[in-house]
């Protein structure tokens, strides 16, 4: 089982994001405060969301939302990503989700190696923390499953990109669809020239964004 706490005596919130490397759609962030003094059987199944099947993620999401002391999910939009870049948009989504928590934590456990400090709450960055601490793993599951729902809704409007399966990551199907149909209004224009969309943008694609 993953570790319960990073510190002693502090109310910790795990914070993680999803969708940072996608070519389209928002970036999501989730924060979770697990209840102190309780140990649920499903804790043994918590892990980095990328290591779990879709079915297991959805089942664990229900347990997390029903039993956590507090949890929240927030987003930064494609327009915000294009305006302030993906790193700062990720920080923005994380700050929004921390602000949305109904209970104020004493310490933030951030998955990764960088974070923009949140006012008045100390934080600790933990590389691959979603595979080390329960609260971060729980946050990774919520961030992933909630963003997947957003991409499923967008898929209904733009089925040609296969977002129901690739969730807007740069799979071959997704990249070929961009070449054929151009970009949707939900593609991240700032990823042009970054290598993520290199060779995929053409005049027709740009026109289809408008």
Image: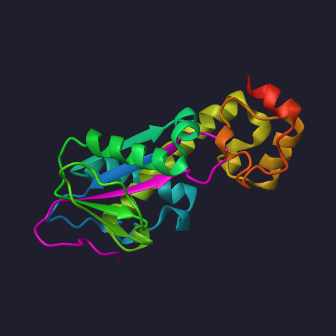
Q: Residue at x 63, y 50 (%)?
A: 22
Question: Residue 97, located in which quarter of the rendered image?
Answer: top left
In the rendered image, residue 170, in percent from the top left (x then y), is placed at 73, 53
Question: Residue 183, located in which quarter of the rendered image?
Answer: top right
Image: 79 above or below 119: above
Image: 158 above or below 142: above
| 59 left or right of 192 in image | left
In the rendered image, residue 54, in percent from the top left (x then y), is placed at 56, 56
Question: Residue 93, located in which quarter of the rendered image?
Answer: top left
Q: Give the main secondary structure of the magenta stretch.
A: loop
Q: Residue at x 87, y 32 (%)?
A: 203
Q: Residue at x 50, y 48 (%)?
A: 145
| 62 left or right of 24 in image | left
Farthest top residue in view: 210
Q: How is the image coloured?
A: rainbow
Q: In front: 84, or 139? A: 84
Residue 7: say if magenta: yes
- Which residues, given as a range, are shown in magenta? 1-27
């Amino acid at each position: 089982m993953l570790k319960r706490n990073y510190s002693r005596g502090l109310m910790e919130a795990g914070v993680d994001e999803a969708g940072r490397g996608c070519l389209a759609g928002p970036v999501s962030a989730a924060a979770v405060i697990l209840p102190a003094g309780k140990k649920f059987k499903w804790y043994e199944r918590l892990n980095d969301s990328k290591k779990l099947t879709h079915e297991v993620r959805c089942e664990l999401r229900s347990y997390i939302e029903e039993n956590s002391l507090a949890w929240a999910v927030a987003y930064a939009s494609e327009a915000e990503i294009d305006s302030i870049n993906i790193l700062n948009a990720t920080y923005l989504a994380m700050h929004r989700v921390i602000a949305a928590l109904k209970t104020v934590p004493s310490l933030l456990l951030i998955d990764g190696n960088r974070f923009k400090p949140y006012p008045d709450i100390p934080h600790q960055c933990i590389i691959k923390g979603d595979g080390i601490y329960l609260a971060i793993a729980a946050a990774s599951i919520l961030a992933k499953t909630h963003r997947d729902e957003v991409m499923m809704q967008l898929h209904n409007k733009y089925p040609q990109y296969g977002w129901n399966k690739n969730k807007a990551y740069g799979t071959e199907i997704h990249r070929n669809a961009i070449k054929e149909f151009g970009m949707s209004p939900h593609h991240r224009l700032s990823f042009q020239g970054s290598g993520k969309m290199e060779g995929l943008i053409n005049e027709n694609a740009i026109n289809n964004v408008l």
